[in-house]
Amino acid sequence: MQSALSECVSRTVRRYLADIGDTECGEGLHALVIREVEGPLLREVLSFHDGNQSRAAAALGINRATLRKKLAAHGIS
């Protein structure tokens, strides 16, 4: 059985593929999905932890330095 998150991703990717048809995704679908998902994921987890980067990094399973690098890459302060 799929998790609710997995089902949501499946539906969204299926809809995206139907929308673009045979058009190639220049950067590759994997890179596109990661780019589109990572920013909102970081914002939501950071918000959930009231801006505490150490707790957010722990929840994400990454170290704080990696989180700070990702936040900077996405323009999140």
Image (tube, rainbow, N blue to C red):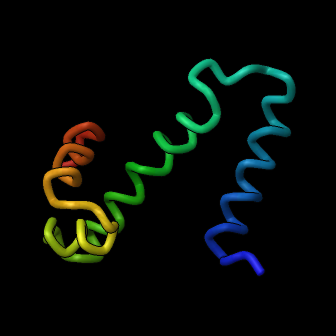
Q: What residue is shown at x 62% (from left), y 27% (from top)?
A: 28
Q: What residue is shown at x 73% (from left), y 76% (from top)?
A: 2
Q: Number of numbered discs present?
A: 0
Relative horizontal placement of residue 8, taking residue 67 as reference (left or right): right
Among the 4 quarters of the image, the one containing residue 16: top right
Front-lying residue, 59 or 21: 59
Among the 4 quarters of the image, the one containing residue 55: bottom left
Q: What residue is shown at x 15% (from left), y 65% (from top)?
A: 53
Rendering coords of residue 19 (x, y %): 81, 36
Relative horizontal placement of residue 40, taking residue 45 as reference (left or right): right
Q: Where 56 falls versus 16 (above or below)?
A: below
Rendering coords of residue 49 (x, y %): 23, 76
Front-lying residue, 75 or 5: 5
Q: Where 1 falls versus 66 (above or below)?
A: below
Q: What residue is shown at x 16% (from left), y 68% (from top)?
A: 51
Rendering coords of residue 4 (x, y %): 66, 76
Q: Name the quarter where the N terminus is drawn.
A: bottom right
Rendering coords of residue 42 (x, y %): 33, 58
Among the 4 quarters of the image, the one containing residue 21: top right
Relative horizontal placement of residue 36, taking residue 60 as reference (left or right): right
